[in-house]
Amino acid sequence: MLQNSNAALAEKEVKYGVLLCQRKSLIIIGCFLLFRFYPLHASGEPFPIGARSWGIGNATVALSDRQSVFNNPAGLGFLSNNFISTSYHNRYSIAELNTFALGGNYNTRVVNVGLDVERFGDKLYHEQKLGLALAKNTGRVSLGIKASYLQAVVEGLATKRTILTQFGVMAKLSSTVQLGFSAYNLTGARLFRSQRVPTVLRLGVSYQPTKQLLLVGEAEKDIVLPTLFKAGLEYQIVKSFYLRTGITSKLSNVHFGIGFQSKQFFFDYATSNHSLLGFSHHLSLAYQLGKTQQKSL
């Protein structure tokens, strides 16, 4: 009787083992097909940096601010101040998806220079990026170019490196309207064979009818994905305190944020909600070098 019971138990364990192996095989095959036919970049390159950016739906291609070195190098050309900024991004409360960034800009008589560092991931998989940007304005038009060294590491398996390029243009149509364009990774650089670095084109506009109100809109086109539309609003409710909101199409993202300025320090916080994946949180702290020359965030 005991032998029959042990035999039945052993048979069940074998069947369970077979089913488990089959399930693992299906998962592996599914992952293979996913990355084979829908190659993605783990960090979501190019990942928007800065809580102000996330607060207004990442429609920043036509904005010149302290995060321009990350989002559109042409914006550096219109900056009259030098900044150092740091940002932390926690996506969907998953520690493995955290992104840290540090950047700054310095204006010279010839060109404006920007430098940034980004790190995404954890010990098992992480990406690191170091970028150098140059920008020059001719009065109403600013041109910017950026080169970044990107390294991706799969712990104990592989390390891949590549060079990314970005080109940007920004134009002041009037005292209240500004256009922006950015082209990211036009050379089609790759890391892993099944993991492409996206080539992304962005075109947008910013409109500031009053000192207190800023409206932004943008169209983003990944060359293998549908066009994404973004819109955002920033409102100065009292001196040095800002409220922000934004929305993006197709991804079902809603964005909210606040900003506060105290002398030469800038604090920004934003949260974004995905209808399926949940909430993400974004924090930025910036310091302006020298005296204040511009009042807006």
Image (cartoon, rainbow, N blue to C red):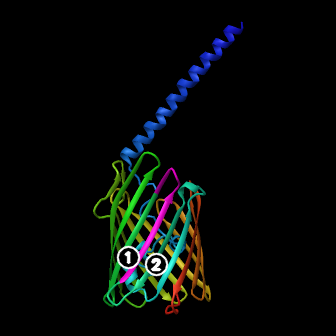
The numbered disc on residue 289 is none
Image coordinates of residue 69 in percent, x first then y, are 42, 75
- Residue at which label 2 appears: 104
Q: Which image quadrant: the N terminus?
A: top right
Whether 115 is among the magenta residues is: yes
Tag 2: Cα neighbours inside 10 Å, few (<14), some, or many (≥20)? many
Label 1 secondary element: helix
Whether 184 is among the magenta residues is: no
In the rendered view, tell whether residue 146 sits above or below residue 242. above
Tag 1: Cα neighbours inside 10 Å, few (<14), some, or many (≥20)? many
**Magenta residues, start to end:** 112-126
Number of residue marks: 2
Q: Place residue 196 in its image quadrant.
A: bottom left
- Residue at which label 1 appears: 73
Outermost residue to the top? 1
Q: In this view, does 100 lie to the left or right of 34?
A: right
